[in-house]
């Protein structure tokens, strides 16, 4: 479903991604880990066209992301993205956050958007919060709303960029539980996270990045059992 081939990207003279290749099949849960600054966020942002790149190719569901003429807004509408800092619209209620994209981008009626949004809000356990504003919710609740908002768009895949790293420890599990549920239902996911418990539980692939290179791309058992690179072994020793 997502095919990344020899992807390289520079910020000015600084090469942030070097010849990265990997692919995600339908239903795969790929966990991407690695030291801060290794290019993880940049990699997943290139997948839905939030960051341009200079070399290589990314194909998402048959669409070439970097090709001239690709309709990036249409592509983005089909890929859910959840960020570290929730990024809800602060001036809109929870319900309005859930419905805006569905109405504006997908052209759904307000009623239909409400029904879908509330279905997913219920699913993340927050139906009773629909009239609140983001700043009236905890971080964990805001992140669950962000996930419900992404799901309301019927994405073909979900990208997560450190979705729990801005949360107080007691809120991490409520967000991870939602993500585990999605993974178990077969959602295709690319997840940048250092939550290795999550990786062990639901990932089927682990990518380890360092300095813009993909150093490991393997099954979870292989990654946790016997990472090939010394950098990955060091990394695991430090975070587990
Ligand atoms: P990670 O998510 O693994 O921490 P990032 O993808 O955010 O890494 O960043 C990789 C590298 O690219 C870092 O060295 C970072 O400073 C640099 N970088 C990220 N965004 C920009 C930008 N907009 N302009 C210049 N350099 C950037
Ligand atoms: Mg990052």
Image (cartoon, rainbow, N blue to C red):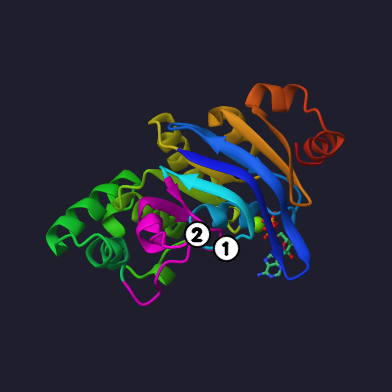
| Label drawn at residue 131 | none
Q: Nearer the viewer, residue 104 or 213?
A: 213
Q: Residue at x 60, y 59 (%)?
A: 166
Look at the numbered disc 2 and give the secondary structure of its residue.
loop
> Where on the picture, by quarter, is residue 17?
bottom right
Q: Residue at x 24, y 59 (%)?
A: 106
Magenta span = 63-92
Q: Please say whether residue 206 is visible from this viewpoint.
A: yes
- Whether disc 1's CB lies below 8 Å from ligand 1 is answered no
Residue on which the image places disc 1: 52
The single residue placed furthest to the front in the displayed view is: 68
- How many labels were placed on the picture? 2
Q: Determine crowd level at label 1: few under 14, some 14-19, many 20+ residues with C-alpha closer than 10 A.
A: some
Q: Is residue 39 above or below residue 187?
A: below
Q: Nearer the viewer, residue 73 or 111?
A: 73
Q: Residue at x 62, y 56 (%)?
A: 41
Q: Indicate the position of residue 167 as horizontal and vertical percent values.
A: 57, 56
Q: Determine crowd level at label 2: few under 14, some 14-19, many 20+ residues with C-alpha closer than 10 A.
A: some
Determine contact: label 1, label 2, CB under 8 Å.
yes
- Which quadrant of the rendered structure holds the N terminus? top left
Q: Is residue 165 above or below residue 123?
A: below
Q: Is residue 170 above or below residue 23?
A: below
- Which quadrant of the rendered structure holds the C terminus? top right
Gap between marks 1 and 2 measured at Cα: 6 Å
Q: Quadrant of ligand 2?
A: bottom right
Look at the numbered disc 1 and give the secondary structure of its residue.
loop
Instruction: State yes or no: residue 32 in magenta.
Output: no
Q: Nearer the viewer, residue 177 or 234?
A: 234
Q: Is residue 95 above or below residue 228?
A: below
Residue on which the image places disc 2: 49
Instruction: State yes or no: residue 83 in magenta.
Output: yes
Q: Indicate the position of residue 119 as horizontal and vertical percent values.
A: 24, 48
């Amino acid at each position: 479903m997502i095919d990344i081939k020899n992807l390289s990207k520079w910020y000015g003279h600084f090469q942030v991604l070097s010849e990265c290749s990997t692919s995600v099949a339908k239903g795969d849960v790929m966990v991407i880990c690695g030291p801060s600054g290794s290019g993880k966020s940049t990699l997943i942002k290139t997948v839905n066209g939030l960051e341009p790149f200079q070399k290589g190719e990314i194909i998402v569901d048959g669409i070439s992301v970097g090709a001239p003429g690709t309709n990036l807004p249409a592509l983005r509408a089909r890929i859910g993205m959840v960020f570290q800092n929730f990024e809800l619209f602060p001036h809109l209620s929870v319900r309005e956050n859930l419905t805006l994209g569905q109405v504006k981008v997908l052209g759904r009626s307000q009623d239909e958007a409400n029904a879908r949004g509330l279905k997913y809000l219920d699913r993340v356990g927050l139906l009773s919060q629909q009239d609140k504003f983001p700043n009236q919710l905890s971080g964990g609740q805001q992140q669950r709303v962000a996930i419900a908002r992404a799901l309301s768009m019927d994405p073909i895949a979900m990208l997560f960029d450190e979705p729990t790293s801005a949360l107080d420890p007691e809120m991490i599990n409520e967000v991870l539980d939602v993500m585990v549920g999605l993974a178990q239902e077969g959602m295709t996911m690319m997840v940048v996270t250092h939550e290795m418990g999550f990786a062990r539980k639901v990932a089927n692939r682990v990518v380890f990045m360092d300095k813009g290179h993909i150093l490991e791309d393997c099954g979870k058992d292989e990654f946790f059992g016997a990472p090939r690179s010394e950098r990955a072994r060091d990394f695991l020793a430090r975070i587990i």
